[in-house]
Image (cartoon, helix red, strand yellow):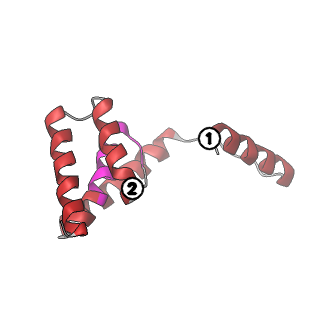
Amino acid sequence: NDPASIMMALDQLASATGVRLRPADKKTERTLLQTHRKGLEEKIAAVTDPAAALMLAMPLIFASTRSRAVAMTGRSLAAAIEAAGETSSLPASEVEFLRGYRSDVMASLTGG
């Protein structure tokens, strides 16, 4: 389940099948991340549902501040907000805003 064992299993599979795995290409990785970020920005601009906007905003924040493409579930949003705040990638005021926004979205979804 950890990344090292996954990479080891991939190496073993590639060796067994005779496939050569190329190392990561940083230029391609940056291009893919930029495309991913632009796609998220376009989706956020078109969405009107607050819950959907939050589900798009957090991956966009991670793509912009950490240069990582991530996929999240609704259950992982609270942890993602905290992680964004812990690494100082977002100012404390923005983290507080995201916490409040998430709370408001959760309240609206649960009818409370």
Which residue is pictured at 31% across the width and 31% down the height? 86
Q: Is residue 27 above or below residue 58?
A: above
Furthest residue to the right? 16
- Nearest the viewer among 84 and 45 is 84
Mark drawn on residue 28: none
Which one is nearer the viewer's eye here, 35 or 69? 69
Residue tagged by mark 1? 3
Extent of the magenta region? 55-69
Q: Is residue 12 left or right of residue 51?
A: right
For residue 66, which quarter of the picture?
top left
Is residue 9 located in the magenta-colored stretch of the structure? no
Q: Main secondary structure of the magenta part?
A: helix
* Residue 47 point in image, percent of width and height: 21, 69
Q: Amino acid at mark 2?
A: Arg
Could you tell me residue 107's position as x and y percent?
20, 62
- For the question of whether residue 65 can be seen, the reply is no
> Which corner quadrant of the image does residue 48 belong to?
bottom left
**Crowdedness near tag 1: few (<14), some (14–19) or many (≥20) residues, C-alpha within 10 Å:** few
Q: Nearer the viewer, residue 63 or 29?
A: 63
- Alpha carbons under labels 1 and 2: distance apart: 22 Å
Three-letter amino acid code of the residue under disc 1: Pro
In the picture, the disc for residue 75 is: 2
Magenta segment: does it hold 66?
yes
Q: Nearer the viewer, mark 1 or mark 2?
A: 2
Between 22 and 12, the one lying in front of the other is 12
Picture layout, residue 61 above or below residue 50: above
Does 37 appear above or below 105?
Answer: above
- Percent position (x, y) of residue 90? 23, 35
